[in-house]
Amino acid sequence: MIIERKTLLVYVSSLLIIFLLGGCAGVKQFTKIGAKKVNVEILYGSEKKEWLEPLVNSFNESEYRLGDGSIIVVDAIPMGSIESIDGIMGGHLQPVVWSPASSVYLSIAMEAWAKDHPSELAIKVPSDLVLSPVVIAMWKPMAEALGWPDKDIGWEDIGLLAISDKGWEEFGYPEWGTFKFGHTHPEFSNSGLVSIIAEAYAGSKKQRNLHIDDLTQLETITFMKNVESSIIHYGSSTGFFAEKMFSRGPSYLSAAVLYENLIVAQEKRRISGNSSQLPVVAIYPKEGTFWTNHPYVILNAPWVSEEQKNAAIEFENYLLDKPKQLQAIDLGFRPSDPTIPLTSPLDSNHGVDIFQPKTILEIPRNEVIEGIQNLWMDIKKPVDLVVVFDTSGSMEGEKISSARSSLNQFIGLLSDRDRVQIYLFNTKIIEMTPLSDLGSKREDISLRVSAIVESGGTRLYDSVKTAYEDIQVNGNPDHIRAIIVLSDGMDTDSNITLDELVYTIKADEGEGGNSIKIFTIAFGNDADENILKKLSEITGGKNFKSDPKTIFEIYREIATFF
């Protein structure tokens, strides 16, 4: 028995030693349970997601610690630069770190913060994480038609192409049609804001010291209006623009304002055989451009503890370490450390030029940026919009209530210069208001929308066909033309089939990106999402899934396209 007990003790001791010394996974789990954690929430521009997300996971898995042994846990959430800072200013977002796409909006944020807080927005001067210049992405044959690479191209060329009656025919390529341009919405996206600031600089023929008086000059106003006239639509996401351009090709977009790293990513796909599109190149506007420098702003906010600030600095040092910066190069970013050589894929084979940009524009004062945004609202391309709204019996209760109120909120986001038409459909199709200027009927529409009631079946296909044919006839081809379809169920009462509807749309899509866009909202669990998605995709629009709680956010997202 004594020998057996000794043997058992040795066996148990051996197991304990193996667990403590050799069982790393077990030790790691033990320390996670026992150690204190310091959480660092980061709101960051989604442009760097592919670089940042794996590094966050690697950092967390390695269990980096503060001096007192606390484990640092990073939670990084991608979010639009302007959306995130608006949330921080409003108090409903409380991160430790804010990392927007660029510093263009940083001074505005700091000024807004100073109005309500005694301290600075940041605990120190923010570091740049990675760099990527703002460029005009253009299909290589089109750039070559303009004289690239021997000739410097810029906003001046974009402006002339935008107002040309002949379009690409003027350069010997009538088959390319009109010039179709795109940038995101400047009230929702960093690249959109940068675009209109660059337009204002080009129109005033300046590269710095842009003044509020420059925005009242006819030459500046006319130039910006000319460029904006070639816009196919706006949007909230630079990545979405890139995806649309690179998936739908030159007939959809001739050029768009993107980031250099997005061009590198597309060219890597093309070279590896994962894209059949034409080569795309980065145009660095001869008038000058801006950097997306991805500043790392550690907030000096009441909700951020000293521990969290120190933890945020530790993660910042981790991201700026040379191996992490080299990983950024492979994704098309330039490292923030200028001593690190720029190697492939940052090269001409991937559509970019590491010796560009030659001119960096000065970030204007806050009042000038605000003035540019106001000017853009006055001269931007208007929208001709038809809303097709399901009022069938299945919309009863909370659904019809939230749909009514959110539609009114959406209409409030549109400009008086926009033209709006509304169709209600159930078993019947009812025109609530014809396609006409919103400004003169805004109050009347609000009252009538607030009184919408539900009943009957779902005549979806007939309603979309009616709306599509109406905007074809009555819509202004010089405007953005779009249809929004909200439905909560499957078609029950149409006289045409889905195939007939699709044929009608495809038979007269217009010229690529200038076609009528259909945005669809599958409202609730019973909505026929596959059908609605098909209708949006064939026009270059977008489908959304929604419910009574999220419907206004969906409408708000759609509003960014106009």
Image (cartoon, rainbow, N blue to C red):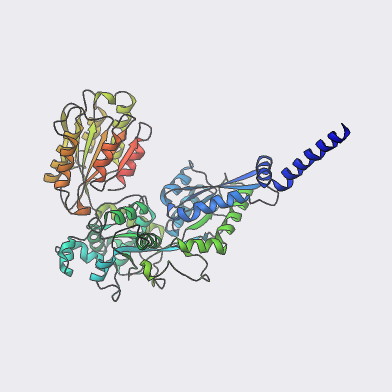
Residue 39 sits in which quadrant? top right
Q: Work out whether 28 lies above or below 1.
A: below
Q: Residue at x 58, y 58 (%)?
A: 318
Q: Residue at x 62, y 45 (%)?
A: 38
On the image, the x and y values in percent for residue 184 come to 33, 53
Residue 452 sits in which quadrant? top left
**Can you see residue 299?**
no
Q: Work out whether 402 lies above or below 150.
A: above
Q: How many marks?
A: 0
Question: Is 248 placed left or right of 308 in the picture?
Answer: left
On the image, the x and y values in percent for residue 387 come to 22, 38
Determine the residue located farthest toward the right in the rendered image: 2
On the image, the x and y values in percent for residue 433 come to 17, 35
Q: Nearer the viewer, residue 146 or 8?
A: 8
Q: Nearer the viewer, residue 176 or 46?
A: 176
Q: Work out whether 141 lies above or below 397.
A: below
Q: Residue at x 21, y 23 (%)?
A: 456
Residue 288 sits in which quadrant? bottom left
Determine the residue located farthest toward the left in the rendered image: 473
Question: Is 168 placed left or right of 193 in the picture?
Answer: left
Question: Is 258 placed left or right of 169 in the picture?
Answer: right
**Can you see residue 127?**
yes
On the image, the x and y values in percent for residue 194 come to 36, 59
Q: Nearer the viewer, residue 96 or 469?
A: 469
Q: Work out whether 457 lies above or below 285.
A: above
Quarter of the picture containing the N terminus is top right
